Image (cartoon, rainbow, N blue to C red):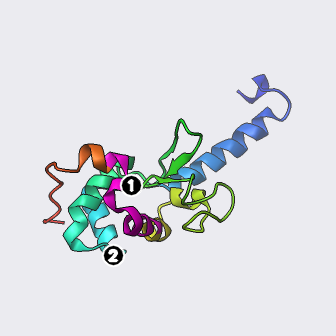
């Protein structure tokens, strides 16, 4: 295979595969109960737990590595799909949460949780389009057995 690649192409391919495998190991697809337990561990109130689980399912499908480019050229990152327009900065610390957006793409959700709570404290669940369209006024996930 490497003999058909341009000079240096094999090295380029190996480096990219290594980087991709590192990125893949840092991301998680959580089960509903794993998510509920993680949220409780990060001090999300139990009284709103079903709303938060619904929000995360609607926004990221419980994937810590989801990023999505939006029509306004901003990008939303991680479990909570935190947007680069106001809350974080791509490639450097910044935004209202004073964090690098890429920090929301790993499986460590402490920083994601702190920023999501800042968003919630300012705007409530209405800040998330996924919650508005899939959770508000609807039957929420049952996490009572988690």
Q: Is residue 117 magenta?
A: yes
Name which residue lies at 13% across and 65% down. 145
89 w.r.t. 21: above or below: below
Name which residue lies at 86% across and 30% down. 7
Q: Relative to 29, is 74 on the left or the right?
A: right
Q: Which mark is residue 41?
A: 2
Q: Is residue 105 magenta?
A: no
Going by the picture, which residue comes out furthest to the top? 4
Q: CA distance from mark 1 to mark 2?
A: 23 Å
Overall secondary structure of the magenta section: helix
The x and y percentages for residue 65 are: 49, 51
Per the rendered image, the range of residues in magenta is: 115-130
**1 or 2: mark nearer the eye:** 1
Q: Quadrant of the N terminus?
A: top right
Q: Which mark is residue 127?
A: 1
Estimate how packed mark 1 is, as few (under 14), some (14 to 19) or many (20 or more) residues with alpha carbons within 10 Å. Answer: some
Mark 1 or mark 2, earlier in chain: 2
Q: Label 2's element?
A: helix
Q: Relative to 91, is 132 on the left or the right?
A: left
Corner quadrant of residue 92? bottom right
Name which residue lies at 77% across and 26% down. 5
Q: Nearer the viewer, residue 15 or 82?
A: 82
The x and y percentages for residue 98 are: 60, 68
């Amino acid at each position: 295979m490497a003999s058909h690649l341009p000079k240096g192409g094999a090295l380029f391919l190996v480096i990219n595969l290594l980087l991709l495998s590192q990125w893949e190991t840092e991301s998680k697809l959580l089960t509903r109960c794993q998510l509920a337990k993680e949220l409780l561990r990060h001090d999300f109130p139990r009284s709103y737990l079903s709303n938060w689980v619904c929000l995360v399912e609607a926004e990221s499908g419980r994937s810590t590595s989801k990023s999505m480019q939006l029509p306004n050229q901003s990008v939303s990152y991680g479990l909570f799909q935190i947007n680069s327009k106001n809350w974080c900065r791509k490639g450097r610390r910044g935004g209202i949460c004073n964090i690098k957006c890429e920090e929301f793409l790993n499986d460590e959700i402490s920083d994601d949780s702190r920023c999501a709570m800042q968003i919630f404290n300012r705007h409530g669940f209405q800040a998330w389009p996924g919650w508005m369209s899939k959770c508000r006024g609807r039957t929420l996930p049952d996490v009572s057995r988690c």
